[in-house]
Image: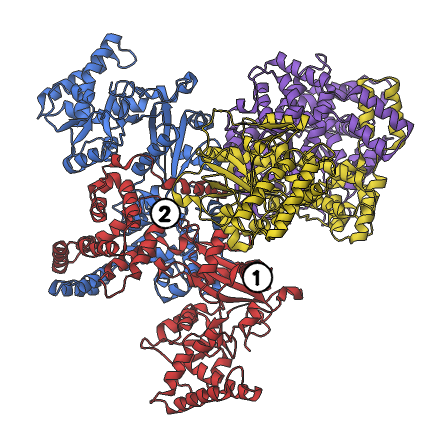
Chain colours: A blue, B red, C purple, D yellow
């Protein structure tokens, strides 16, 4: 590929959003409102002057207040729909005599004029971020205010194609990245807050730290999703080992374990478009290529719903054993002034009670859809990771204690079992986990738990399964 | 916008098509054929290992022979269709009780699994050119060999979104452009063949020559469409003035007229996706910004169907006057050994007979769709240009004489009338033309011809209406 | 110029510092010390294997401790000298019979082998920053420790050519600049300390702030010198107007005045190589090109020696009038608890006493070389600026009060008088100043003061001469 | 290193050659001639307005005719010299009482004002190519026209520092290189003429072809020196194997031998500044890194002086044996109509006579300086290569037959012996050669010939010593 030509090519993007010629030349009337412009855009005028109309519409949209935006989205929801009569007619014709032609006619009748509207809005050079921001505005409107679900569905359908994985580009973020991008990394970090530029530098600059992001060529100064990685000698048991301890690099040994300790989506307007799983898998490949000494790819992840579940479990009528254990645990925590004031013996007792309940939470507690109740678990298990280890008192921040009783979890990404884990999970709700996690259940589990072990092909890491 | 970061960003695209980890890790069986892989891709396996399956499928596709490709496309046409029963059920439900929900259900049932298939194929980094090439292969299959229209329709639908104008980037092509790109310009030029590198340099390098192309960020070393421009003092009457004469730049006066003398589409696989009109309009803006002395934006275009029409006109029963004139003209051409051997007097006679018939051809001769028979005219008139001048003996190449009796035509792009011309043409089939062209008809026209004149706002160019 | 090719070109610099082949192949013996390697480098071995020897020498130098470095520089000072006998012979020959040839021979005999040594050291790709750092180490050796002046003179002579203005590149520093560069800006700022990243952003990011630096292509991630600029409506009277006040941009009027409020040299190893004056003059050009509304180019500069001079002046025997005024002023300052506790009336009295003495300091107080005692004044006056205004209580920071009694000064760069001012200053020691400054002297000056006024050609700025 | 920042940095070079402010502001009088400007540049005015004066001087120089240039260079030769009296005084003082101080004073007195003049000329941004072109002009002046040697010596001294190896950047030239650079490659090729763009493509584009060039950051669109390389399976015996035969890549085996078959200097104005040896050695490193299968680095070089020497040898009185052999050979060539018309038997006879004489030419025939008479041999042997093989009828082009009797030679660059070869050659005139070449001498050699064999460490290539 001809990289440098491409580089010049894209440097000109920045220049091309401006329109030189007066808009009046394109028949745009200053009196037209956004709804009229939207109508013009999908009409014959849009074919001739689409670029100018789209630019004008985007400029006007940017100046709308909240109420005007609501009205505009309402207009899109109501007026930009497939023609009901034409749909009915085509549906009837297809039912009467189904054929390839009748199917195509029905498909055509059902195409949303809104999609064509947004496509034409995208005629304006540089419009991509503006249309993404439009969906952000849409999502911020309270659901009870208006029925805009169909508008959102169409935008999402479009973004699903525009932001197709094949268009995304992986980029390392480091201390040579422009400050304007780093600023956004600070702002977007959603897991372990970045405490200013010195903290950021500690996460990016050392030789055993990495950060990668996906970018889209038409949204160049804004990452879509990023992940922070620590290269270590062992799978960490606590977040402090990642954020605070002296780095393994000082030990002069090659790292064996890549720890994904924070992954954050950046674009509110792209909610529901999946990037995180692709990012993790490509970063696994990048790191394996760069550092052949890396054998383990694990996360250190929060358990945001555990404390709430523990409260519910304590009141559970159907599983009195579990409820009793949960109540005893909660009582012990209160009684001992856990975690700060508990003695070592008390802590050991709490750990002994807490970990089996946590294993139960991950392996047996399911939502209405038959999936684990923990959203982080759902993300990683759905990606084909397995639950490797549950770590006691791994994060003693106020938030972690409140939400997850201080627990953190390692999920392991093993390329050899990702696909199998994913399919077992997707088809049968099976939660892949290590033998160590399963053994925490002490035989009480009736759920379908699979304790997968790493196949012997790769050299076994030091603490892979502890 | 942060250009340099973007540049580094894209330089890494080139690196990211490779997969490090052995494919076997992703459960890809060397025995699976492309059809099985295609099925896997849209299944749950595709969710977990989509990137690897897509890459493998593309690699295998590249090695298929013609027959295997035919079978593969047949598989896509037959097996990757909406579920007939589900469609019928949803259609019936919507007819029985139409609602937003029933409409959404019907739309969902009608979504083509093929589109999802191609979207997942595009999970593979760098896949864009390969999928475009796939449609090129598809289009080359003779229509009578298989019914693959639905496959093509889906690909085209997808490309329409992928290659949305908002993603395209305009780039000047000049003598500093990499040779690999210039090579393609030579190869893709479809109007006036480029006779090697010296000819290319004459078209790119002089101060009064320009070439612009649209590129897509995921197809970076391959232009989508390009246009060659000469900056002149007058609207040219013959192609020789553009390709051969000493350049106006030597005259030391600022150019007033940008002449688009060649526009070529490059990607066979993107047939039917419109780029040319956007390119012309953006180049008008770029040039107006760069050289404020430019007041006229015109083409010098071939008339590829005129000679064939003239033959038909000579045999026309319904318009005996015209038929007689056509026959007289053809006879005069033959008799005088036109054009080389005809005397000046004979040439003048032929011109006097030819131009009115040409005006008739453009303004009155319509196809079944009510549009002009000339494809070049349809393109420019559909873009909102007007027919400015018909030039006698403007191109004496063998091809031009054979196809267009040596005629060339200037179309004028005037921003102030583009939208109106487009709408009149689109809605009513009106052909915008200058008074000069209309007067050639000598009152015989019954067609709805509009002779538009430039509004007075811009300073009138020297020969604007000659 | 072919920019993008250049860009790729330089991206490869980063790769080219590494040597693949084992050093032993080049006959480099691990036992050789830096002095032996230095000898080898200027010998015949250096001709064949210079690149490898230079790289090895630089690697070893980097590991030397302070004492070893001292010894190494001593070796360069002692052993790498012109051959005394050859010099004597050539000098005698030239004195006996001077000719172009004898002159050339003498020049050749006098060429320092050290210069050839450093040139060969620079055979190693990427060596430029290392050799600059070498001079930094050299300059840090206390002068009484060794006589290394000749080594420094040769390095400086070489750097004077290597860092010739024609090689330097001006770059704007802004919020899109890589963090690693911005980090250095924070570190190198020598005038008004940057209080972390938020302060930095306030100086770089607003639309009315600029920062420019000179870079050298072989020292790319390290600026040589930079200047911070505020675009304002008026020449500022106090640093608070630049660093703290709401920006003029909010007023919606085009700026008229570019204020250079901080200029910092970055490279200790390039001490004595002049960059600042070239930077200021090129930034004047850049800004005039970018913002035609800018008519005034002024500094807001500290007066670091004034307080010390005032103490000396109070004890001055030769000018009793001045001494008395100085003593009265100092007494008033003490008595009133100046500046915080002084009343408005007291402040006005102090200002009335202070400003004439400051004018005297700039215009009459000269060092042994006949130049002003103030180093900042020497820099700007030597560049051809004139002293435009002396500002009372312009910087109330502890440092400014202590060193400059809170004064700050505007120097004006007017392209029309730069050369004249420079020559008058260089040849005759004339201090160019505004009429306002001169009038502060109240007729007591006997020095040659030139009060230049802006010629009438450019529109006079609002407060240009207040 | 921060590459992308550098890239942006350099993209601005292109912009910085322009001066916005009218030159009259800088006191530049349109009436001043180049000599007056040159004087002004080294005076005090040059300190203040050097950039503007240098730019003006360069602009005026560009418009001088040949005679005016001659006068200008004469002015530099005559008027810009060290002050004779000051030199004499300093020389005498040093002779009277030599000290570090007196030496420094003498060095200072001898510094050429011309060098300072050229350094100040280089204050103008973008001046580097113009000053290089100035030396080109100087070198084109016939030596008998004026005594400008001292001017040339100073320019050369300056360029030796400006173009120090450490500043140069190696770049691969390929089919993605901008056409404007490739154009220059075609023009500068000095060994095997490039027959247009198709030929160029054959040399750059195939997977087994390479081209590398050195660039200087301030001369970015113009290479300094470039080398063309073919990656092969065997050391080639004839140029046809490189330029015409089907490429080894089609054989699907990794290449073992890098063949440097053409190396060309590009800048006439940099004559005498050495780049070729650095280029060859760095390319050896680059290729060894890229393709570990490469074990042999050889040239295929012309023998431009052999035919002339053979004529002289035939007339040689002092070595009658050799003269007789030479005469017999020349007679055989004439008699047989060599090479086209000679029979196989005759060719074999000619080869048997020719090769020993060629070995004699390389090993024994020396110029007045004790070096081989062949300039190509002097270059490669001086770089530390050894003479590996002499190839009969290796280039049957008219030029090669006329100058070198169709011979071509392989020189081998073996990193393990480069330094030793260089030193033996530089100190003792020893010509390193293979045993095969030496054995051609058949014991008649009295010269000091060293037949070096590759040490056993690296795997021996297939035909390394044939």
Residue occupying image coordinates x 45% and y 89%? B331
Specify few, some or many for label 2: CA neighbours under 10 Å numbering under 14, 14-19, or 20 or more: many
| As drawn, C460 above or below D456 | below
B60 on left or right of D152: left
In this view, the residue in front, B208 or B62, is B62
| As drawn, B206 above or below C445 | below
Residue wearing tag 1: B202
Residue B177 visible in the shown view = no
Quadrant of the image occupied by residue C424: top right
Residue occupying image coordinates x 37% and y 58%? A120
In this view, the residue in front, A230 or C326, is A230
Whether residues under marks 1 and 2 lie with C-beta atoms below 8 angstroms apart, the answer is no
Specify few, some or many for label 1: CA neighbours under 10 Å numbering under 14, 14-19, or 20 or more: some
Helix or strand or loop: what does disc 2 sit on?
A: helix
CA distance for labels 1 and 2: 44 Å
| As drawn, B322 above or below C176 | below
Residues at marks 1 and 2, common chain?
A: no
* Residue B52 % position (x, y): 28, 40
| As drawn, A326 above or below B59 | above
D8 on left or right of D53: left
Residue A132: give its label.
Answer: 2
Residue occupying image coordinates x 37% and y 46%? A133
C25 on left or right of B18: right
Label 1 or label 2, whichever lies nearer to me, is 1
In this view, the residue in front, D311 or B122, is D311
Chain letter of disc 1? B
* Residue C386 % position (x, y): 76, 37
Q: How many marks?
A: 2
Chain letter of disc 2? A
In this view, the residue in front, B165 or A200, is B165
Quadrant of the image occupied by residue C216: top right
Quadrant for the C terminus of chain A in the image: top left
């Amino acid at each position: 590929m001809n990289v440098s030509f491409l580089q010049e090519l894209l440097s000109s993007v920045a220049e091309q959003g401006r329109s030189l010629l007066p808009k009046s030349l394109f028949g745009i009337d200053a009196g037209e409102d956004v709804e009229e412009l939207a109508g013009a855009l999908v009409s014959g005028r849009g074919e001739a002057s689409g670029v100018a109309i789209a630019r004008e519409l985007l400029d006007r949209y940017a100046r709308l207040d909240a109420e005007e935006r609501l009205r505009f989205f309402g207009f899109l929801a109501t007026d930009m729909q497939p023609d009901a009569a034409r749909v009915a007619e085509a549906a009837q014709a297809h039912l009467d005599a189904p054929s390839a032609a009748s199917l195509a006619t029905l498909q055509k009748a059902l195409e949303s004029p809104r999609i064509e509207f947004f496509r034409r809005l995208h005629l304006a050079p540089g419009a991509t971020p503006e249309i993404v921001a439009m969906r952000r505005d849409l999502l911020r409107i309270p659901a009870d205010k208006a029925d805009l679900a169909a508008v959102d569905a169409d935008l999402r359908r479009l973004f699903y194609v525009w932001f197709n994985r094949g268009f995304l580009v992986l980029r390392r973020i480091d201390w040579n990245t422009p400050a304007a991008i780093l600023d956004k990394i600070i702002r977007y970090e959603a897991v372990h807050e970045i405490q200013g530029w010195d903290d950021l530098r500690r996460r990016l600059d050392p030789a055993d730290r990495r950060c990668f992001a996906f970018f889209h060529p038409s949204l160049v100064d804004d990452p879509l999703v990023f992940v922070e990685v620590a290269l270590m000698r062992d799978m960490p048991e606590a977040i402090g080992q990642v954020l605070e301890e002296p780095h393994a690099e000082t030990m002069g040994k090659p790292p064996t374990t890549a720890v994904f300790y924070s992954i954050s989506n950046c674009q509110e307007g792209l909610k529901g478009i999946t990037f995180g799983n692709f990012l993790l898998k490509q970063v696994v490949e990048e790191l394996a290529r760069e550092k052949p000494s890396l054998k383990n790819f694990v996360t250190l992840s929060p358990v945001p719903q555990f404390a709430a579940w523990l409260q519910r479990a304590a009141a559970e009528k159907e599983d009195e054993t579990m409820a009793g254990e949960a109540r005893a645990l909660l009582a012990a925590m209160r009684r001992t002034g856990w975690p700060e004031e508990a003695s070592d013996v008390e802590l050991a007792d709490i750990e002994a009670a807490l970990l089996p309940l946590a294993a139960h939470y991950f392996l047996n507690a399911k939502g209405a859809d038959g999936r684990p109740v923990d959203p982080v678990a759902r993300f990683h298990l759905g990606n084909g990771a397995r639950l490797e280890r549950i770590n006691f008192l791994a994060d003693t921040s106020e938030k972690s204690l409140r939400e997850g009783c201080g627990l953190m979890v390692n999920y392991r990404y093993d390329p050899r079992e990702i696909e199998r884990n994913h399919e077992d999970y997707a088809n049968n709700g099976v939660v892949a986990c290590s033998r160590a996690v399963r053994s925490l259940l002490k035989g009480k589990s009736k759920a379908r738990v699979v304790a997968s072990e790493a196949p012997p092909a790769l050299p076994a890491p030091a603490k892979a399964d502890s």
